[in-house]
Image (spheres, grey):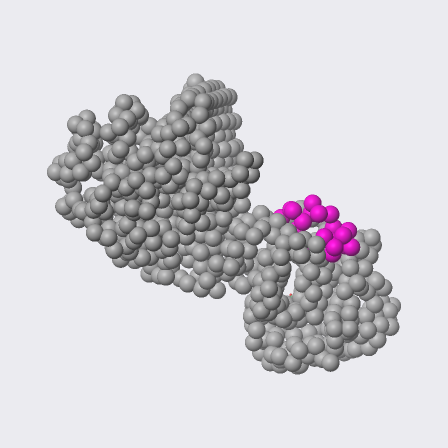
């Protein structure tokens, strides 16, 4: 209840030009030469002190990529990207090895402050521990593996995680310190040949997170990473790999906001999740990259490949996403339900305003017996935006007893935007039960007026109604982020009415 | 003192004039009933007072506490004390009634420069009011009006009225769709809110409601005008003879 109140409080009259997080941090950086070649790939690998096998892996991906063409099936429209006109690597100049947050560039810390992170950061910095039996969510610890530009600058709570046996570190470090794990799992969910952007990522990925949770361990804290793009013309190629071994549990949250830019920026991340027998991974995203200005200029191109493999029996992977940013979003967090009785979930809120284009959804691939999946998608289109849900649910021949429930709701604000639902369903097995529900509605003038008659402003009314519309999904987020996401939803719809 | 003064109001909807010069004065502490056949413009009047978009005022004025109401945004009017109990209250899925009440109340208080209610104060107040209206706490956890019966929806309107403490309450067809018991509960709630500082405008098609909420003044509306005003006995007269006589007068 106070959260909604707070949301309402935060709503100020600004338009997309006044993007809240549009600022740059002035720190020196270290760039690869512009353009993409084997030399670029070698430069990146060298910068990261990678072993030879890693370089080889990258080069193979690069060569593969040269033979591929950009996909065009998504309902998005943008000028052709000149891949030779981008930088593929930028790192803050390393001053020295960081052992505590005090040693981090104050400019970087200030960036986090502007993002409104301190609330949790303070708890983290001071290591505030809830008293036994006290589950104050605001004080619950969150380990932040801060990815600043392309290099992770701080890793906290490492010690405690280590005690639990959880490995949580930048993937660049994991490549050196846990090569056997990385070699075993990297590319095992999203192969280097998977798709144009995933292949590109495989060749030039800069950094990202690596998580390994050993058998039977419940990860003692939420793991979260904040991504920031901070270099003009720098493609961001995050690579994240999370492995939950037998009977383990981990909840990971990724949130991002990006500074305002004139030129479009390419972001092509790959996230791979592996859940073994009886393991569960919960992956949440709050995405707020720069969406472009009110004329549709600038903004991030977000071409992401996220996939989870329920490799073991009784495993579970749950994706929750709140997508409010980016000029173009091309993103389908998916689950391969390989293990018997495994379960995949996809909860999504995708908001588009201004000239944003969203083509997002999920794939649920039922391979094992008695696998189940659930898809709840809430698309909200405002301004002149286009918002497409694209989903695939398949059951293979051996996937007896596969079940899926899909509910896809779209809400339109104004009459210059569009919402589209593109479901693909393939059951190669007669015992599969797939249910699909879809609704599209316009935000009702009568509902808005009712709220306004009770004292809410037009924007507060829209915020309230929309937050009600997405409630089922918001509830899936870790509580501290649900509040933040709620604010973000209201902020991203500012200027959408009236 | 005059709380609401509607002077020679002319209103168009989609190029068609609906109110053709309506005049009405409501003083503090008074309860006025507006009666009239369907389509005479009763809801239109209430919507224009509340500031619903889509209505074009082509002539006349509306003063509220001496101020030009038509110059104010609808939420500003609410904060100043204008409350409209809707004929058909809408549903707001996913927004708990309690959340809605608090958000709205605090928005109004903030607009008036008052501090927000503390959680315990707010809860105490809601509990008190909902109890007197026979509204179970569990209903307050549900989405606004979602799955509410007709009677529950109307009681929810009265609950908000009691909570926001407006100085002008307009009740549009509060009796529509209610059985006698539901009507009595809602009417008792309304009567409890009668006060020397508060005025009410009760819009109804039927005399029945006025047995429960007894008005000081009754107006008859026909074809976009007030054609006759009188005491509460006028309602009984109408009940006996119907609206036909006034249709000709209009
Ligand atoms: N939004 C609208 N668009 C077109 N005509 C309308 C609209 N609202 C009301 N009217 C017309 O205005 C007249 C008065 O309607 P209304 O104020 O609802 O009457 P009442 O409440 O007395 O039954 C009716 O003829 C109705 O058809
Ligand atoms: Mg009416």
Rendered image quadrant of residue B72: bottom right
Residue B95 picture location, percent across and down: 59, 50
Taking the spot 55% from the left edge, 49% from the top edge, the residue there is A468
Residue A123 picture location, percent across and down: 44, 45
Of B120 and A466, which appears nearest the observer? Answer: B120
For residue B142: magenta? yes
Mainly helix, strand or loop, the magenta region? helix
Residue B36 in sight here: no
Q: Is residue A127 above or below residue A335?
A: below
Q: Is residue B200 above or below residue A247?
A: below
Of A142 and B225, which appears nearest the observer? Answer: A142
In the image: residue A457, left or right of residue A23 = right
Taking the spot 29% from the left edge, 47% from the top edge, the residue there is A104
Residue B207 picture location, percent across and down: 82, 65
Taking the spot 65% from the left edge, 46% from the top edge, the residue there is B141
Q: Which residues are magenta?
A: B126-145
In the image: residue A394, left or right of residue A37 = right
Of A365 and A220, which appears nearest the observer? Answer: A220
For residue A103: magenta? no
């Amino acid at each position: 209840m106070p959260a909604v109140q707070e949301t309402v409080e935060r709503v100020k009259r600004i338009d997309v030009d006044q993007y809240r997080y549009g600022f740059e941090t002035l720190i020196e950086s270290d760039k690869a030469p512009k353009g993409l070649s084997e030399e670029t790939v070698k430069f990146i690998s060298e910068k990261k002190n990678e072993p030879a096998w890693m370089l080889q892996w990258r080069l193979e991906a690069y060569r593969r990529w040269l033979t591929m063409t950009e996909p065009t099936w998504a309902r998005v429209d943008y000028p052709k990207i000149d891949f030779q006109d981008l930088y593929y690597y930028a790192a803050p100049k390393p001053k020295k090895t960081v052992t505590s947050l005090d040693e981090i560039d104050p400019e970087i810390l200030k960036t986090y402050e502007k993002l409104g992170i301190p609330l949790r950061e303070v708890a983290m910095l001071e290591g505030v521990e809830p008293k036994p039996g006290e589950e104050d969510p605001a004080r619950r610890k969150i380990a932040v593996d801060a990815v600043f530009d392309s290099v992770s600058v701080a890793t906290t709570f490492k010690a405690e995680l280590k005690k639990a046996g959880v490995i949580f570190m930048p993937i660049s470090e994991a490549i050196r310190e846990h090569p056997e794990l990385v070699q075993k799992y990297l590319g095992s969910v999203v192969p280097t040949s998977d798709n144009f952007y995933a292949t590109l990522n495989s060749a030039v990925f800069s950094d990202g997170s690596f998580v390994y949770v050993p058998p039977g361990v419940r990860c003692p804290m939420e793991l979260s990473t904040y991504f920031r793009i901070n270099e003009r013309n720098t493609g961001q190629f995050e690579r994240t790999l999370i492995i939950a071994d037998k009977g383990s549990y981990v909840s990971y949250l990724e949130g991002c906001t990006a500074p305002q830019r004139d030129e479009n920026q390419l972001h092509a991340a790959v996230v791979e999740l592996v859940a073994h027998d009886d393991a569960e991974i919960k992956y949440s995203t709050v995405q707020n990259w720069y969406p472009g200005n009110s004329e549709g200029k600038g903004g991030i191109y977000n071409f992401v490949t996220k996939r989870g493999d329920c490799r073991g029996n009784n495993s579970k992977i749950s994706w929750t996403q709140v997508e409010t940013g980016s000029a173009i979003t091309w993103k389908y967090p998916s689950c391969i339900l390989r293990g018997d009785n495994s379960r995949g979930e996809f909860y999504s809120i995708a908001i588009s305003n201004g000239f944003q284009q969203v083509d997002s959804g999920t794939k649920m691939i039922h391979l094992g017996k008695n696998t189940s999946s659930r898809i709840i998608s809430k698309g909200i289109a405002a301004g002149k935006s286009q918002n497409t849900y694209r989903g695939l649910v398949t059951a293979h021949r051996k996937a007896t007893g596969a079940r899926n429930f899909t509910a896809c709701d779209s809400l339109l604000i104004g009459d210059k935007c569009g919402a589209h639902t593109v479901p693909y369903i393939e059951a190669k097995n007669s015992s599969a039960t797939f249910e699909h529900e879809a609704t599209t509605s316009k935000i009702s003038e009568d509902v808005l007026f009712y709220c306004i008659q009770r004292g809410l402003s037009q924007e507060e009314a829209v915020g309230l109604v929309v937050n009600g519309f997405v409630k089922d999904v918001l509830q899936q987020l870790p509580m501290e982020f649900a509040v933040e996401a709620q604010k973000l939803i209201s902020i991203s719809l500012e200027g959408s009415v009236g | 003192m005059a709380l609401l003064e509607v002077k020679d109001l002319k209103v168009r909807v989609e190029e068609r004039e609906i109110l053709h010069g309506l005049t009405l004065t409501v003083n503090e502490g008074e309860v006025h009933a507006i009666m009239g056949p369907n389509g005479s413009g009763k809801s239109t009047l209430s919507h224009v007072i509340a500031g619903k978009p889509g209505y074009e005022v082509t002539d006349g004025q509306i003063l509220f506490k001496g101020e030009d109401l038509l110059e104010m945004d609808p939420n500003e009017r609410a904060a100043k004390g204008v409350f409209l109990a809707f004929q058909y209250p809408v549903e707001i899925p996913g927004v708990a009634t309690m959340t809605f009440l608090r958000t709205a109340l605090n928005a109004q208080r903030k607009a008036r420069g008052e501090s927000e209610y503390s959680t315990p104060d707010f809860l105490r107040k809601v509990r008190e009011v909902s109890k007197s209206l026979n509204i179970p706490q569990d209903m307050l956890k549900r989405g606004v009006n979602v799955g509410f019966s007709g009677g529950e929806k109307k009681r929810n309107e009265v609950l908000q009225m009691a909570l926001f403490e407006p100085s002008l309450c307009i009740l549009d067809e509060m009796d529509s769709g209610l059985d006698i018991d539901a009507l009595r509960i809602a009417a008792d709630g309304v009567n409890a809110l009668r006060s020397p500082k508060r005025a009410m405008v009760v819009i109804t098609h039927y005399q029945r409601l006025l047995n429960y909420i007894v008005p000081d003044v009754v107006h008859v509306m026909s074809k976009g005008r007030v054609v006759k005003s009188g005491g509460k006995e006028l309602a009984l007269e109408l009940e006996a003879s119907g609206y036909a006589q006034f249709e000709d007068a209009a």
